[in-house]
Image (cartoon, rainbow, N blue to C red):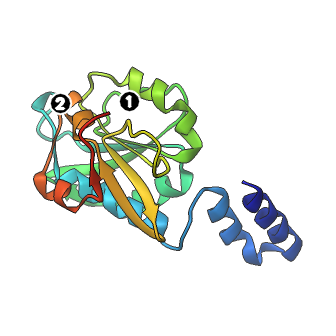
Amino acid sequence: MVFRRVLLRRALELGVSMLPLACAVAQGIRFAGETQIKAAYLFKFLAFTEWPARAFDGREAPLVIGVMGSEALMKELSQTVAGRTVADRVVSVRELHAGDSTTGLHVLFVGRAAAHRLNAVLAAAKGQPLLTVGEAEDGQPQVVAINFVVVDEKLRFDILPSAAELAGLKISSRLLAVARKVSTGS
């Protein structure tokens, strides 16, 4: 936290040349390309997750990814999914703020900036067919179905299948096989 403040102060002293780096650090981005990789993973998770029919309003209903607590990821993900489909469904992205409903979402990413709201968001979404994705630090209890972690400046993810199962979702064994860790309990 102190490092971030010092970096932001130095960026202001040196002018805008360091501003992109300072903004990245302030948003919790720990290495170049982290946001792009998360966006790509979120898009790829769609192909390895099975939702019940009740998750969609019809055959042409889109797959909707909600993003809370990360403006940078929201922008990157919007570009990543633009014009793309998964299982013949258009993919769209929606930004969420405190108090917004998760109804109609299929994936919900809760970034570090909104981590303090995670439990309330999960409680409000209970019973919905919603794949939850977060980015809690390694070693913290995992409460979302998929959690991003950075290990040796590489983005990895852990999976908690029971969280997906409680939401009525099925995660492909192929995705489980490439996870860094698959947890058996919550």
Q: Quadrant of residue 113?
A: top right
Circle 2 sits on which residue?
Answer: 168
Looking at the picture, does residue 127 appear above or below residue 57?
above
Q: Residue at the location (54% across, 44% down)? A: 69
Q: Is residue 81 visible?
A: no
Q: Quadrant of the N terminus?
A: bottom right
The answer to whether residue 97 is seen in the rendering is yes
Q: Amino acid at mark 1?
A: Thr
* Rendering coords of residue 134 (x, y %): 42, 45
Tell me what residue is drawn at x 32 percent, y 22 percent: 126
Left or right: residue 23 compared with residue 143: right
Q: Looking at the rendering, which quadrant does residue 83 occupy?
A: bottom left
Element type at marker 1?
loop
Considering depth in this image, is 123 or 51 the residue closer to the camera? 123
Image side of residue 153 versus residue 44, left or right: right
Please state if 133 lies on the left or on the right of 62 as rendered.
right
Crowd tier of the residue under label 2, counting other residues whose Cα lies within 10 Å: few below 14, some 14–19, many 20 or above: some
**Where residue 16 sits in the image (x, y, percent)?**
78, 73
Q: Which residue is mark 1?
A: 102
Q: Can you give x and y, in whole percent of width and height, for residue 24 in the image?
A: 62, 64
Mark 2 or 1, which is nearer the eye? 2
- Kind of residue at disc 2: Gly
Please tell me whether residue 98 is drawn above or below residue 61 in the rendered image: above
Residue for point 47% across, 66% down: 34
Q: Residue at x 42, y 26 (%)?
A: 101
Q: Which of the marked residues, 2 or 1, is nearer the chain's N terminus?
A: 1
Nearest the eye: 17 or 88:
17
